[in-house]
Image: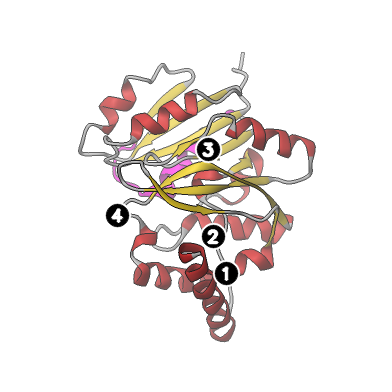
């Protein structure tokens, strides 16, 4: 008999021993039927050991990659293994507010949206607020998303069957952004809950912290999505403009 699961939470983890307890605890306090799939991507610290304390083979499942696969393929393993109606993504250094998943599942259950995200609050490495909340529009369309990636990965809840239509690809680019673009290109829009239910830790090693690298990856996304040089340059300028506004207010 299959277990009853509403949300499958996919958590890739690599050398996250300092933060993963906070992430796991924020999942387990959610008031929906869920499973947590932790994909350890060959961590060299105590990440797997700490995650293993929670693993019970039922609600919390720890998966060990045989080799380092990167975040996109690790998330795909979780998507493939998911037993829930919905998949939620959470990076091992971020965490959620209580009630986040219930609010998003209710919205998806009551509408024809296939993807729901939330606003986020930026946090320092030690978990203290940085005094910056990045909001989201109530409806995010494909043209809007082309101009700026306004969907934080760790805030997303998406229908499992939709996630399995596309999966994630190209770790060397913004793999989550590519997925959102493909989803909205087909389904038209996503729903945004403009409450900072995601606490987003600004890790030093994150892709978005290296602005030059992030910019190159962003341009690469437009080229991957089939846009020519002129269109790619146009959308890149929009991305740069919105990026300044996003992080400086």
Q: Where residue 107 sits in the image (x, y, percent)? A: 72, 38
Query: Which quarter of the figure has residue 57?
Result: top left
- Marks 3/1: CA distance? 24 Å
Q: In which quarter of the image is the N terminus?
A: top right
| Side of 144 where 210 appears, left or right | left
Q: Where does residue 60 sit, x and y in percent of width and height?
A: 44, 22
Q: How crowded is mark 4: few (under 14 residues within 10 Å), some or many (20 or more)?
A: few
Residue at (65% x, 41% y) in the render? 161
Between the C-alphas of marks 2 and 3, the distance is 18 Å
- Provide the secondary structure element on which disc 1 rests: loop
Whether tag 4 and tag 2 are in contact, CB under 8 A, the answer is no
> How far apart in space, not on screen, are marks 4 and 2 (Cα)?
21 Å
Closer to the camera, 138 or 185?
138
Q: Residue 225 carries which label?
A: 1
Region rendered in magenta: 65-83
Which residue was labeled with disc 3? 80
* Circle nearer the N terminus (2, 3): 3
Is label 2 in contact with label 3 (beta carbons under 8 Å)?
A: no
In the picture of the structure, the residue carrying the numbered disc 4 is: 205
Residue under label 2, please give it: 178
């Amino acid at each position: 008999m299959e277990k009853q699961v509403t949300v499958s939470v996919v958590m890739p983890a690599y050398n996250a021993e300092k933060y993963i307890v906070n992430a796991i605890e924020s999942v387990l306090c959610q008031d929906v039927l869920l499973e947590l799939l932790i994909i350890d991507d060959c961590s060299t610290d105590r990440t797997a050991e700490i995650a293993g304390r929670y693993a019970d083979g039922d609600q919390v499942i720890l998966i060990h990659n045989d080799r380092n696969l990167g975040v996109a393929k690790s998330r795909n393993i979780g998507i493939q293994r998911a037993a829930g109606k919905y998949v939620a993504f959470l990076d091992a250094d971020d965490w959620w507010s209580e009630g986040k998943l219930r609010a998003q599942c209710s919205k998806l259950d009551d509408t024809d949206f296939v993807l729901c995200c939330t606003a986020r609050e930026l946090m320092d490495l030690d978990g203290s607020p940085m005094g910056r909340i990045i909001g989201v529009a109530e409806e995010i369309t494909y043209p809007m998303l082309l101009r700026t990636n306004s969907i934080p990965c760790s805030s997303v809840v998406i229908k499992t069957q939709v996630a399995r239509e596309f999966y994630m690809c190209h770790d060397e680019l913004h793999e989550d952004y590519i997925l959102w673009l493909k989803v909205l290109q087909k389904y038209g829009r996503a729903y945004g809950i403009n409450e900072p239910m995601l606490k987003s830790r600004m890790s030093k090693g994150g892709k978005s912290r290296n602005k030059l690298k992030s910019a190159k990856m962003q341009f690469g996304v437009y080229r991957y999505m089939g846009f020519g040089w002129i269109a790619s340059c146009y959308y890149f300028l929009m991305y740069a403009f919105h990026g300044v506004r996003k992080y400086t207010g």
